[in-house]
Amino acid sequence: MTRELTVAAGQLGPVARDESRASVVERLISLLHTAHHRRAELVVFPELALTTFFPRYWEEGPEVIDAWFETEMPGPATKPLFDEAAHLGVGFCLGYAELTPDGHHYNSQILVERDGREVARFRKIHIPGHEDHEPWRRFQHLERRYFEPGPDPFGVWPAFGTRVGMMICNDRRWPETYRVMGLQGVELICCGYNTPVHYAPDPSQDILAPFHNQLVMQAGAYQNGTWVVAAAKGGVEDGVDSIAQSCVIAPSGQVVAQAFTAGDEVVVATCDLDWCQRYTTTIFDFDRYRRPEIYTRITAQRGVDRAGDEQARR
Ligand code: CDV
């Protein structure tokens, strides 16, 4: 018997700065219904799904900043989503800004099982952008002002009859993300993202944004023999265009389903979970072929070390 799981990426179009959480939750519930109708058992929603992508604004004062964050999950605004999902028997993965009881600010994702049970919380590990106001940019990307990097390593949890991992937006660009999960036998990675088309530090990359989005996730899926479900918040939000392209990627690296629009849309695929083993027991049989003793630099150093140049010149 094959192990199958039908999954969905619940893509959101733009969320206006003044749109209420209640209104966004209504949109998420509508996506949930569509996904359920199409037999999905797990819906992945975008990063920071409940509000506009607020790191584009320079905000001052703890009260103003904290207003973008959730202090409870579920809280009063999100409870209807949790209730409806449990009622339908559909699990989900939701990105939100988390303010913990002891005052930490994280860019987080929660994974909830079909019966409404919380499986895990994941806090974004790679925090992109900048800390200070940089008026030369068309818009800010102040994630490094508003969020601390997640303190926990990438995890993998038994859930949905498989092994599920999580990553958030910029995490998907780093090969270490997938490999740390691959080494824990991941079979399905859930990812939410907000990726503006315009990249201020090097605008020559703008035209390549959708290509890079697929490139990294297809490579990560293939090199670790895992499914990836990725959900965007796309379209023009407060004048800033973000890529959409939500998708489901197979362990072969092939995109098996993809969004057609940059608005609210459900992308569904049925994942044959045994497909993972075709890769993890052959070309990427880690036990047989990996050489961790040769890769020590990966964890021993952070930036580039050219100390070897001097020696080579002699
Ligand atoms: N939300 C993000 O993490 N966005 C980044 C942008 C800034 C490049 C991304 O990696 O898509």
Image (spheres, helix red, strand yellow):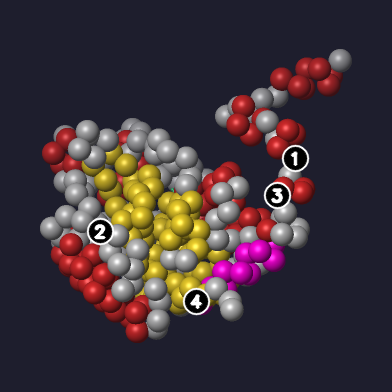
How would you rate the neighbour count of disc 1 (Cα within 10 Å): few for under 14, some for 14-19, many for 20 or more?
A: few
Q: Position of residue 106 (x, y in %)?
A: 32, 42
Whole-number angstrom distance, CA of label 2 to CA of label 3: 39 Å
Which of the marked residues, 2 or 3, is nearer the chain's N terminus? 2
291 versus 119 height, above or below: above
Task: Name the residue that disc number 2 marks.
Answer: 50
| Residue 276 part of the magenta segment | yes
Earlier residue among tags 1 and 4? 4
**Which of pointers 2 and 1 indicates the residue nearer the eye?**
1
264 lies above or below 162: below
Q: CA distance from mark 2 to mark 1?
A: 43 Å
Q: Amino acid at mark 3?
A: Phe
First in sequence: mark 3 or mark 4?
Answer: 4
Q: Which residue is mark 1?
A: 291
Mark 4 and 2 residues: CB-CB less than 8 Å, in contact?
no
**Which numbered disc, 3 or 4, marks the residue closer to the eye?**
3
Q: Which residues are magenta?
A: 269-279
The span from disc 4 to disc 2 (Cα, nearest Å) is 24 Å
User: Residue 179, image x and y in percent?
Assistant: 60, 48
Whichever of callouts 2 and 1 sits on the residue coming sooner in the sequence is 2
